Amino acid sequence: MLKNKGNRAYRVLDFLHEHVIAIIIAVVVLAGVISTIAIVKGDVKTSAEETEKRTYEPMNTIYFAMDPVKSLNPLSSEDRDVYYISQLMFSSLFRLDDHLNIEPDLVSSYTANSSNGSVSIKLREDAKFSDGSNVTAEDVRYTVNQILRIGEESPYYEYASKIDSVKTSGSYSLTITFENPSDAALDNLVFPIVSSRSFDASSNKVVGSGRYTYGSYDSMKFLKLKPNQYYYGGAPENKIQFKVIQDKAKTTGLMTTDSVTAYVSTAEDADADAEDKKLNVTQFPSSELEYLGFNFDNKYLAKKEVRQAIALAIDSEGLIQDNYGGGGVTSDSIYFPGFLGTENKGDPFEQDQKGASELLKKAGFKDSNEDGILEDSKGRDFKLKILVNSNNGSRSDTASSIAEALNQIGIKASVEKVSWSVYRSEIRSGDFDLYLGGYQFDKKYDLRALFSRSNYLGYKNDQVLNYVKKLETCISAEQQKETYEKLKTLLQEDLPYYGLCYKTYSFIAVKRFTSTEIPTFFDMYRGCDTWKWEKVVVTEEKEKE
């Protein structure tokens, strides 16, 4: 150590060098003492200090957010929110359960005749409109005529336009005959019934027979609904208030202050955002299918062993997590998961690359030159292109993941990413091997266009088409389920479309919330009459000495 005793400054430095450890310890101890003093001082409470007390108050009003709308008329409004709100205020002849089964609403009993496409209906005699008047057969006839008069601008025209006539017999009996027996499914009769005595197309105060009725409305602020005291199922306990907001992206933020009780989000990252804000999140299947279509004019893909092998090579669960943000659920067919109350067993082609390779070998492919690429019987490489629209990021990434999986089993797969217009053009002209697509189904799930002889895949199976058509006829719920079970078996065998997943929506609710029933993709407020929640109440109290 360098020492210089002749200089005072050096002597100080020399002292510090020799006692540096002791000095550091002293500083640390001193800092700890100071911190302790500060903490103790901070804990000392004066007689006037205030503290927060949190309690929870049960609420009997459910708060929702809604966009500004042009009209509350259920038969003509093209506003998305009105379509869902109307299901709270209006009853229909039939309604759909969570599995898209038909069940009676205003109907007491019915007899369906599939041969001539008619259904004879007896209405509930205890069903009343919110003004106390009975729902009659004439109201049904009047509603159908109103929808037909409005035309294609009505969200229910597609359903009512299939009806040829409505003949009434007394106050509560009627017979509905469809124009075509092959287009006469009972799920066409799910439109709202309005009162023939008080309906006013120009008024926002429309009388309905649903659980709730019109309370008050300010087009820029709110829509209040109150329980319908005449509802045949008993008046709900909850009241409902829709708050008009200009930007629904702010809904989650409003929930943190209890200004909105619950809502449904279709955004892929909605669940993560809600969890960050410590809100309740439940995911449920939408009607948005992501699928792989096979071109049957391709000599390789015309073989079902090849189609099945491709499905076996794909990790659908992995795609859901990696490419769709976890927001998806597998289904055992391209129909809705658990369609008509059948059991959804998930992906029937869980990833099995060894099984895929065996199927390809059975189909006549082998890697003769051991270069990792399979060849057909003439020695040509097995090549496939996957067509995808480039404007959909998740779908484009999925196509790349599928191509990688196919390369692993010896198929030389590549991805063709094109614009939306080119994508549609190439599918319609059949200029593709495989294409990755998306389809958002209506709640009726009429899939005849996907299996008709003019479908884009070139797929033809008369038995499949017959079953699909039968589902659109006037048959009972039991007959529908039986028909679908047979159809599902055929679709799993033929595999013209391979369903990768159904996207999920997020039902987001405040923290202290309970429900026995949650929304569906076609009924965003289902079960809200039974929902319960508690509002956080913060009060300030003064501590006594």
Image (cartoon, helix red, strand yellow):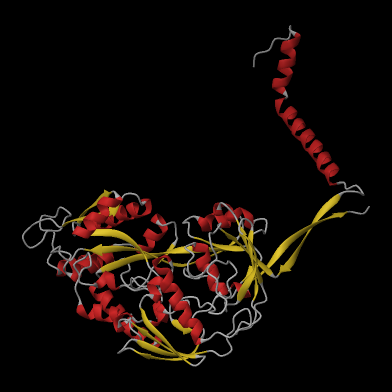
Residues 301 and 198: in front is 198
Number of numbered tags placed on the structure image: 0
Residue 446 picture location, percent across and down:
34, 74
Q: Residue furthest right?
A: 545
Q: Quadrant of residue 63?
A: bottom right
Q: Quadrant of residue 437?
A: bottom left
What is the quadrant of the N terminus in the image?
top right
Residue 387 position (above or below residue 162): above
Residue depicted at 84% across the width and 46% down the height: 43
Residue depicted at 74% across the width and 27% down the height: 23
Q: Residue furthest left?
A: 378
Residues 485 and 398: in front is 485
Residue 139 picture location, percent across and down:
51, 82
Q: Residue furthest top?
A: 6
Residues 321 and 534: in front is 534
Q: Do we see residue 99 in this rendering?
A: no
Q: Do we see residue 354 in this rendering?
A: yes
Q: Is residue 3 left or right of residue 350?
A: right
Q: Is residue 88 left or right of residue 365?
A: right
Residue 477 position (above or below residue 279): below
Residue 422 position (above or below residue 330): above
Residue 3 picture location, percent across and down:
68, 12
Residue 326 picture location, percent across and down:
44, 59
Residues 445 and 352: in front is 445
Residue depicted at 56% across the width and 79% down the height: 197
Q: Quadrant of residue 161?
A: bottom left
